[in-house]
Every structure is written in C-alpha cells, then in structure tokens.
Amino acid sequence: MAGEDVQGGALAERWVRVRSRLRAEVGEAAFKSWLKPLVLMGVRDASIRLGVPSRFMRDWVIGNYAERLRHLWSEEAPEVRGVEVVVLPPSAGPSTAARPAAAGAQGDSEAGVAPPAGTASAAAIQAARAQDAGEAALDARALEISAPLDPRFTFDNFVVGKPNELAYAAARRVAEAETAPFNPLFLYGSVGLGKTHLMHAIAWHLRLHKPRKRVIYLSAEKFMYQFVRALRTKDTMAFKEQFRTVDVLMIDDVQFISGREATQEEFFHTFNALVDHNRQVVISADKSPSDLEGVDERMRSRFGWGLVADIHPTTYELRLGILQAKAEQVGVTVPLKVIEFLAHKITSNVRELEGALNRIVAHATLVGRPVTLETTQEVLHDLLRASDRRVTIEEIQKRVAEHFNMRLADMTSARRARAVARPRQVAMYLAKQLTSRSLPEIGRKFGGRDHTTVMHAVRKVEELKTSDSSFAEDVELLRRMLEA
C-alpha cells in the first residue's frame, strides 16, 4: 500500500466498508452529522487523508473519531498507521467528489471519494491549508467566546408537536435561509420546554452546512461578563468588533440583563448594528418581549420587530413522543404502559421528563431488573409525590413568614437584619428544593435579587442544617408542612 498504487477502486471499496461499520457503530444521527460529509482524498506516507468542509468539523472529527477511523482502516489495510483530516477548499467538497465505480461500492453510493492523488490533489491540499489558515483568523475570536454546543441538541433530535411547531419551523427557516427571514427570531417559554435545544440546533446546522458563516451562541450572562471585562481592560472597541461582525448572534435567556442599564445599552447598539447589516439575531427568554421586567422599552420594542414564537407547555401527546424518542436513543426496552404513565404524571417540563426516564433506565441497567410500572413508581417516588402537588414560591414565603413570626412584606424588602435575612434564606432554600423555578426566577420573587444571592442562601442553609440540629428540625418541619 505504498504511494499512489492503492488509489482508485480498491481504496474506494475499503472506504465504503469503513463508512458502513462507522454508521453501524455510532448511529444514523451522529453519522449524518459528522461522518457522512467526510471525503476520501487518498493516502500518503501510510496515512489515509480525509477532507471535511470546515475547520470546526475537522477539529470535532479529530477529537472524537480519529482513533476509531485509524483502527478501522488498519483492519482493512494493516499498512495504514494514521489518519490525516484536512479542510477542503470550496471546490473540492463532497458535491464535486468522484463517486466510486467499483462493484464493492454499490452499497454506499454517497461515499465521498476525491480524485486520485497527483498534481490536482497536491494543489487541493495547498488550497485547503490556505483556506484553513484564513478561517482560523476569521473565526478564532467567535469560537473563543461562543458557548459549547450540546451534540444531542439537533433538529433531528427535537420532537415536534402543537406546543412548539411554530418555534421549530421558525428555527429551521433561520438555519436554512441565505438571508435573515425575520430579525430577530425571539423564542420564549417556561423552563425546560426546548428553547435552548432549538438555539443549539440552529448553531449546529449553520456550522455543518454553512461553515464560512461566523456564529456566536452564548447566554446573556456571558455577554454581560464579556462587556464588563472589556470595560475593565479598556478594550471596548475589540468587544464591539467581536459582536458586530458576526453573521449570526444568538443570545440565550436575555431576561438576565434586566436591570443592567450599561449592558442593555451596549446590547441595544449591537442589535441595531447587526439588523441594519441584515445579520441574523436569535434571542430566547422566559417571557414575551412585552412582559420582560427591568428591560428598557426600546429593547422590548426591538425584540418584537421580527417573529415572536411562543413554546407552550407540553401536551400529553408531545410528552409521549418525547419519551418514545428518548427510549429509542438509550437503547433500553421501556414498556408502553410505563411511558404512558410518565407522560401522564410528569407535566412540568421536558427536562424533568427526560430526567425521570434516565433514572429508571439507569436503575434497570445497574441493578439488572427489567423496567416495569412497579419499579418505576418505586424509583421515582419522590418525583411523583412532588408532581402530585406543586408548591408555589408565594406559598413558601407565607408559610415561612408565619413560622418565624415576621411580616410577609419583609420577604421582598431590602432589610438585612438577621431576624429577617435568615428566614428569607430559608424560604429561598425551600423554593429551590420544592419548585422547578430557576435561580434567577426565585431571586426575582424575593424583591428582584440576583441569582447569586439565592445560591448563597442555599449554601448557608445547608451549612446551618449540618451544624445546628434545632435549625435543621425547623427547616424539615417547614418542608413537611408544605408538601403535605
């Protein structure tokens, strides 16, 4: 297998077999996303050379599949000792690659094989390396500040139903369109209904199918952090350049900038600059633009310019579909009556629903017992009890205020006296334990406090429960009274 002698039909047949084994090992979804676009470019110095359309995909394939590719190739051809992955120039992608003509290739007609190595192949390599360097210079800053994407959150893994069909269709349109179809796309809904999943799906689609577009996805908190850091280092011009030259900007949980006047001002100007240049902006929040508290009127008006898509609470049919899809992914047989039971009992959000399924699957796998309705009720007894009666933050505040003989108004006041602060911390702790509300939501219910205040309260109460048995009894009594 030296030099160019192995080019052509024999190499193409081996590539088809390698691809077929990879497809069987990683599953159809991962194969379509990461391995199907690979193009066989040839062999050099006992290394198989594969081409991909973008630097991002090259890094992902090297980090996650390179060793497996090398192993499979070495089984097909023991002389192969390595795998090299390079970025293709625009004209050398899978769409222009030659298809294998050998009989052994008929089982996978989509296998990408580049023309035989030689002068054209060497030119392609040089062009690929030049393009790679150019992409690195353009995208380095965007990749540095963009949040990591969850590989599970793709369009293929999103279960569509009536509560989310508009948001899903709008997200797909944004991902597939050449120019911004509506600007901004504003997704809103309660916790755990799929907003973040759709934003990740848009980013994945763009990175895979339009790799030359610069995409930044991050939370509003991280945007605020980047802005504050730029102010401290007196480098606001670099900050403006980072965010105002991207093709797609996606900001998750924009409600976190409420009350932050300087951050809102900068985001307002960034938003306008991008929209004026027809760059796509995608925003998510827990409320519609008109209901966002602590957000400037100008910002709320801008958010409503494009398409506002609400993700409603899940229906029974949608929950059923989500559970069935999740059960197929984990590869464990879950009886239909168990799936129907979970879909009926756990109605709060998709995260809790998937978490419940993960628990019963983990129990079945680790303990070695089959999944039954009885084991499901046993494993999820705490979650099912909590689902039967949802405690509200208002109830918690009222019961804690009564227990500690304080005014209910002090729960949301600015008073910091110990007689007020400690019961308030207990109420925050119980709100975290007994409700599905996020930390920022809990903070807003306690007089607009920051989520870090809630985190501190939770840690403080846990410490006191360990060191003060009387205090621990008080907290446990309150919990039982609220759950009763």
Image: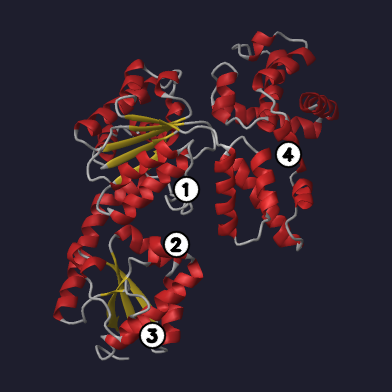
At x 46%, y 38%, the residue is: 164
Which residue, given by chain and number where applicable, does mark 3 sit on? 80
Asked which secondary structure carries label 1, the reply is: loop
Query: Decide: marks 2, 4 in contact (CB < 8 A)?
Result: no
For badge 1, the amino acid type reads: Phe
Q: In terms of secondary structure, where does tag 4 sit?
A: helix
Inter-mark Cα distance, 3 to 4: 55 Å
**159 with respect to 239 (left or right):** right
Say whether disc 3 or disc 4 marks the residue closer to the N-terminus.
3
Judged left or right of residue 207, residue 368 is right
| Residue 3 x, y percent position in the rendering | 26, 89
* Location of mark 1 (residue): 158
Q: Nearer the viewer, mark 3 or mark 4?
A: 4
Element marked by disc 2: helix
Question: Disc 2 designates what residue?
Answer: 30
Count numbered badges in the picture: 4
Q: Quadrant of the N terminus?
A: bottom left
Q: Earlier in the sequence, mark 2 or mark 1?
A: 2
